[in-house]
Image: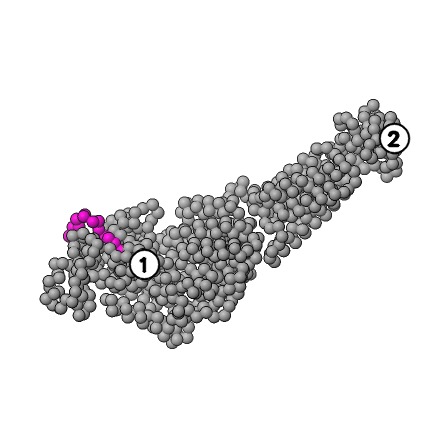
Amino acid sequence: MRLGTAIRRTFGPLAAALAVWLGGGVAAAPPTVVVPIRLPITGTRDTEVEAAILRQLDRLRSSPTERGLLVLRFVAADGESAGGSDFGRALGLARFLADERLARVKTVAWLPDGASGHAVLAALACDEIAIGPEAVLGPAGRDGQPVDATTRAGYAEVAARRRTVPAAIAVGMVDPAARVLRLSTEDGDRFVSDADADAVRRQVTVLAEEPMDPVPLSFDGRRARSLGFVQILASSPEALARGLGVAPAALSSDPSLAAGWKAARVTLSGGITPQAVERTKGRIERAIADGANFIWLWIDSPGGLPEQSLVLANWLAALDPARVRTVAYVPDQARGDAALVALACDEMVARPAAVIGGGGAAAIGERQGEAITAAWRGGVAKKRGRSWSLPVATVVPGLEVHRAEDAATGRIEHFSEAEVAARDDREQWRLGPRIGTGPLEVEGRRAVELGLATHAVDDAAGFCETYGLDGSIADAEPGWADRLLEALASPSLAWLLLLIGGAGLYIELKTPGIGFGGFVSMVAFIVYFWSQHLNGTSGWLEVMLFLAGVICVAAEIFVLPGFGVLGLGGGLLVIASIVLASQSFVLPANDYQIRQMQWSLLGILAAAAGVAALGLAVRRWLPSTPLLRDVLLEPPAADADLAGDWDDDLIGAEGITTTRLAPAGKARIGGVVRDVVADAALVGPGAAVRVVEVRDGRIVVRPS
């Protein structure tokens, strides 16, 4: 057995390389199906696995020359003990796997975390066993617990059918009373029970004897491979694919095997913020709780906070692919760190012209880039068993990625020099030309060529067709309150709020005091900064700058004459606060941020032009309306006498107000319409007033 394993291990890569040379390219992979086995094997889990295999049997037998490859991934169910499998259920599944119906199918038991209890029986029924190096196979029985003859016979029967593990070892894994010896002979090692050892000694010359332990038997991955029981050491899909000689994509789990896809669509739009991450996680969790096994993650984001993108990416990578498949769909953009979220899913699909990676809303420096690289390598890349260089290069500046070819199989990957140097199989990889330096901005069609994306589709209908999704797709979307919040955070509504706020300020300036215009303006600007906060671009700094600017402008108008430092500085503070509230950076550091600043300034100019046009219309039409005539000061008639010069001789002069004084307004004094300020409460139009003081260029009047 060990000789055969050594031959496969030595000449397997040479055979693969020869197949590539003869075929003129990468050898065609056999039909491959991955079926999860939820541990423990209880209830109807055995029959569910059998039904899933039978539905795929025609596909596994479809190749006339290649045996189909059936990978059974043993995974522990959430919150359940992996060692509590029912013997009858496990034996029934083992007999099914050893049945003649699967004669043209190569079965591989993959135990990335090992297996114990009677689940071991199902693993022994497969043609090959793959296990993690540190994972443990066994024990199948409990120490000190007696085992009946039926159980021993079941293990011996399955082992004899497949010969993956000697029958004596199989019985020794379940029966604590069984004693197994390893006999070294001229023909190789033999594993026999203590009772059968004498018969072997009479037949062949025994060179050495070794009792097997512990009791009942169990083996970690490395020991099992050295004994010849395990053919492949693999704790990740990439390692398993390498051992089986297939592409890693062929080993993706398909949760739909049990009962088809039950899809739910979740949208992640706008900036990546803690609130956006929590909303997305919550919607996905609710969808899974409702029975969804396919999460359609619709991403349209410029990125935002890289650390929050990593939080969501690691959470997505930790989802059990045997229970739910996550597929990211990028119709327009997943820029910057938003690409990390898309690439953390099981698969990514994009429109041909969609943008993945490159410069985004966050400017990533050298130290932050190193932190992102370390977090991705130890998190998503490790959980998914994938290469880390190319995904990280879509975000981190300065990382060079090369095309690499496996000399044994011809498989193409994309590595940085650091990743190749850290690989155990680095000697068989040949680095080719450099494909780019981070941050890489990749279009959808190019992402497919590089292996970042699985498919490129034109629209959502193409996505559904690709995955065979029907019209019954649940929208794990927010309620009306969340929809309102997202609408308020949209750029188009943000500029409308600025227009309303500016128009309200104009009206308020024409009617001093806190009136209708001031109220409308206050509400509009509060909603604007709140919406930008929801969008992840505004905080307390922007609000404080805006308030400081408004206070400076008000002081310049109502306290100090003229238009000086306070007015100019306050206006600049207001503009700066609005610009900063519409973007997640202060100064642009990449092309995307430069474009965003241009759009922000253009939006402010458009809002200002709108305020000017609206002001002209309001000034002309509002004073003539019966309901709102007192909201805005009516401009004087064209033939009215206006005066801007005055002196102390006006003190004591009397006149009649032509507009409401609130407290400022206009009054006709000495036959001349003058700007005045009331020294009392509001004064209505047509009231008699008397000048009591002339100070700082203002005429102060009081009702007479």
Which residue has dot 2 on it?
648
Query: Is residue 209 toward the left or the right of residue 133 in the image?
Result: left
Q: Residue at x 52, y 52 (%)?
A: 306
Residue range of the region highlighted in magenta in the rendering: 137-150
Residue 251 percent location from the top left of the image: 38, 60
Q: Residue at x 70, y 33 (%)?
A: 514
Q: Amino acid at mark 1?
A: Pro
Which residue has dot 1 on it?
133
Query: Is residue 140 toward the left or the right of residue 680 in the image?
Result: left
Q: Main secondary structure of the magenta part?
A: loop
Residue 54 percent location from the top left of the image: 31, 58
* Above or below 316: residue 222: below
Q: Secondary structure at mark 1?
A: loop
Residue 503 percent location from the top left of the image: 71, 41
| The N terminus: image quadrant | bottom left
Q: Taking the image as drawn, is residue 657 in sight?
A: no
C-alpha separation, residue under disc 1 versus residue under disc 2: 99 Å
* Above or below 687: residue 506: below
Rendered image coloring scheme: one colour
Magenta residue check for 147: yes
